[in-house]
Amino acid sequence: MTLKQINTESSTLLVIDVLNSCCRSKYEIKKWGIRFSKIRKMVPKLVVFIKEYKKRFKNPIIYVNCTRWDKKHLPPNIIELYKDPRCRYYSEDKTGFSEKFYKVKPEKNDIVITKSNYDAFTSHKLSRILKKNKMKHLIVTGVFGDGCVHATIQGGFSKGYNFVILKDLIETTDVKIRQDLQRLLKKYTWPVMFGKTITSKEFLRNIS
């Protein structure tokens, strides 16, 4: 797939999990060394890109958020996984603020998808919207690169969608092992197995 093959009418931008819980310092887990400074550095670039994208694409942007990350709202397989203390991560925020978007603001014609698992395609609403609007190409941004972003890319590719992965607008926590994994995803796994993996500047330069 070349960028010239991308029809702006059959493409849409996915913004995955740019949420307070994944970006703000108050939600960092310092005892685990989990910090979001690299994510906060990326988000302003994403905001600028979204503005430029809106000028060129008429289709609504699809913003993905998540349900409250607790036992009441998560599926049985995640609850089972979290029985292992090494894997366990439940949100303690009961206010709903953690699930709100961070610095990105869906507009009236945009679409918000709420997921209860890592892969956004576990929300049947996403598949329905893409089919209804005859979308073929998904342009991906968001967090975490090694988590929900990767899961969504895998899920969507398995359903037959083509991907353009904007590597400079995808980020994960500062944890070294996660940064190392994300680097490998951007360098090898995504471009070889899932789709065109380029920078946002390359994308805009090649889209008429």
Image: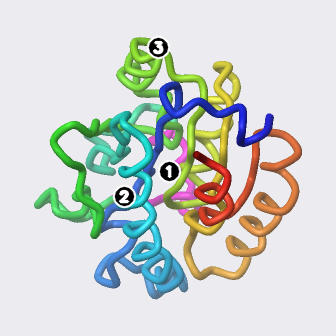
- CB contact under 8 Å: marks 1 and 3: no
Q: Which residues are magenta?
A: 78-90
* Image location of residue 151, percent across then percent down: 61, 42
* Image location of residue 134, percent across then percent down: 49, 15
- Crowding around mark 3 (Cα neighbors within 10 Å: few <14, some 14 to 19, many 20+) is few
Q: Name the element at disc 3.
A: helix
| Residue where numbered disc 3 is placed | 131
- Crowding around mark 1 (Cα neighbors within 10 Å: few <14, some 14 to 19, many 20+) is some
Residue at 25% from the left image edge and 64% from the top image edge: 92
Residue positioned most to the left: 95
Residue type, mark 2 in image: Tyr
Residue positioned most to the front: 208
Q: Which mark is residue 142?
A: none
Q: Name the element at disc 1.
A: loop
- Crowding around mark 2 (Cα neighbors within 10 Å: few <14, some 14 to 19, many 20+) is few
Which image quarter holds the N terminus? Answer: top right
The Cα atoms of the two marked residues, 1 and 3, are separated by: 34 Å
Residue type, mark 3 in image: Lys
* Image location of residue 157, percent across then percent down: 69, 29
Q: Is residue 135 above or below residue 109?
A: above
